[in-house]
Image: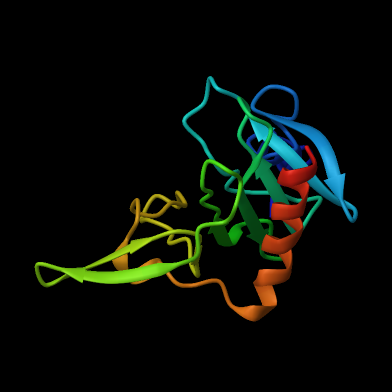
Amino acid sequence: MGGNGARAAFVANTLEGYTGVRFQEIRQINGVKVITVSNQTNTAIPMEAFTSKMYYIADPRTGKIVHIAFYAKNGDIKHSIDLKFEKDGSLIPFKQTVRKGKIHTEGTHFHKQWPVDANGDKGRSSHDKDNIFPVNRYYKRFVNLAVKYNLEH
């Protein structure tokens, strides 16, 4: 809730509000935007989005897709996929190993949740071992489209 213009102020801090400053659309895949993130921000993935339920996020230096982000109805980030590639462009599959009694993961992986802290800020600990999963069959189709895009561009 809020008065006139309240939503406009909130949107100013979202992906759409920063379009051209922090985020820029470079292409589309089946109607889904492929965006880049400015080198001048610490944000790798937009935390909110109101015009889309999903974005492919490309590295600004290479133009290759490195993340896929999914958003809830209220615009908050819901899930994300981190794509990892070999130098030849092939996808590195998810792999879990145990070394010295600790679980280590590598390769392309899925983050099921983006926690919200007491201040309302969204974020996750980098490679939180309890929030790294293999990409399931439903989301694999988006990964396949990203891989195809990277090979073509």
Judge left or right: residue 31 versus residue 135: right
Q: Visible in this render: residue 55?
A: yes
Point out the image quarter for the N terminus. Answer: bottom right
Looking at the rendering, which quadrant does residue 102 occupy? bottom left
Residue placed furthest toward the left? 100
Q: Is residue 79 above or below residue 124?
A: below
Residue at image point 68% right, 22% down: 21
Q: Is residue 9 above or below residue 78?
A: above
Judge left or right: residue 45 versus residue 137: left
Residue at image point 68% right, 33% down: 36
Q: Is residue 26 above or below residue 96?
A: above
Residue at image point 75% right, 24% down: 20
Residue placed furthest toward the front? 88
Q: Nearer the viewer, residue 136 or 147?
A: 147
Label tally: 0
Q: Is residue 4 above or below residue 103?
A: above
Residue 85 point in image, percent of width and height:
53, 49
